[in-house]
Amino acid sequence: MKPIYFAIIGYGGMGSYHGQELMAKEPEKVQVVGTYDLSEDRQVLAAEKGYYSYTSYEEVLADATIEAVLIATPNDTHKELAIQALEAGKHVVCEKPAAMNTEELDEILSVAEKTSRRFMVHQNRRWDPDFLIVQDVYQKGQIGEIFQIESRVQGANGIPGDWRHLEQHGGGMVLDWGVHLFDQLFYLTQSPIKKITTDLSYILGDEVDDGFHCFITFESGLKAIVEVGTTNYSKLPRWYVKGTEGTMKIEDWDLTGELIAATKDQTFSPPTPIQAGVGLTKTMAPPSEEATKRIPFLEVPTFPSFYENFFEVIRHHAEPFVKNEEVRKVMVLIDQVLSNEREAAEVHLLESV
Ligand code: NAD
């Protein structure tokens, strides 16, 4: 069966990664014919990789060999580019965030429905090995009932690039990283949110958030702390997961960390008090060796890649692995986080008058 012929729209950091890595790994499923980028330099670079250089988006859309486009441009351009492609009869793979807000996403989805074309969002961090390990522990109950998850990404380089600093282009870390971390939590818990409190940071003086904290309570009772930081010269673990009978910590994408569970069905002598600082504590003394066990992390399974799934969706009407209703839930949450922030700013203004 013939592969799906693609044009990449926006051959920047992520567009080129799709072409050279993600799509290149699935040559029987997807093939890149050409690219279209507003930047001449990026077009030259793409041509050096052997891709045809389209001179306009209209030329891409008029090319009958192109069955699908990948949109990997700044966030504010996704809606228009996606709608034009769908109306021209192309399927669309779109980088996250799908759009600037739920209203825009709904416009795209209604055109996709009207034209019977597929619109699929690249929520790639569902494939991250660290996330799959957390999901495994969550499902197996190895550390009892999980009552709190802390999910963090932290860097020390500020907001990268150009457009990510600007609100009009959909910059800021809520739209950039929040969309991944919220998607993972929704996908993991499959639970609606009961309550959310947010705190966005503007440490470096940008007009958009350079990080944030979100405190989420799910209707299932699980609580989560989601944090993104761009001025963290020393990092906290990527994941810290607390269960009633154990704790898991994953330090980073290198998968270092530990999964420690209480040894059940045995009685142990209580921990002996330790000297801590200038005091003594029994509460904070480590449990005895026999009272806990270390469990190895899951051997991360292989399963169909994003593009393998996209191929199956287009050619065999398979279920998309990333469903639009899931993408929409994340977008609604992001709207809420950003509108909380605007309301908070208004309150500050009133107080300072
Ligand atoms: P980038 O700035 O590196 O690249 C964007 C490219 O789009 C640039 O080359 C620019 O010239 C081009 N461009 C801008 N407007 C255009 C238009 N109207 N038509 C054609 N080309 C246009 O940005 P990036 O980091 O590659 O981010 C692009 C998208 O990918 C964003 O939506 C971002 O959120 C997403 N992204 C996703 C991941 C992920 O892991 N899923 C990682 C990074 C970026």
Image: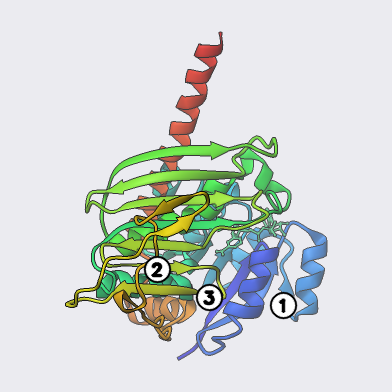
**Looking at the image, is 1 positioned above or below residue 129?**
below
Q: Is mark 3 within 8 Å of ligand 1?
A: no
Task: State which quadrant residue 15 falls in.
Answer: bottom right
Q: SS for tag 2?
A: strand
Residue drawn at point x = 26 percent, y = 62 percent: 244
The alpha-carbon separation of the residues under discs 1 and 2 comes to 45 Å
The alpha-carbon separation of the residues under discs 1 and 3 comes to 39 Å
Whether pointer 1 and pointer 3 mark residues with C-beta atoms closer than 8 Å, the reply is no
Instruction: List the residue tagged with mark 2.
Output: 248
Between residue 22 and residue 243, name the one nearer to us: 243
Instruction: List the residue tagged with mark 3.
Output: 256
Number of numbered discs overlaid on the protein picture = 3
Q: Report the amino acid beneath label 3.
A: Thr
Q: Report the amino acid beneath label 2.
A: Met
Residue drawn at point x = 49 percent, y = 28 percent: 342
**Looking at the image, is 295 positioned above or below residue 28?**
above
Using the image, tell me which numbered label, if any, was put on residue 163: none
- Dot 3 or dot 2, earlier in sequence: 2
Instruction: List the residue tagged with mark 1.
Output: 51
Q: Report the amino acid beneath label 1.
A: Tyr
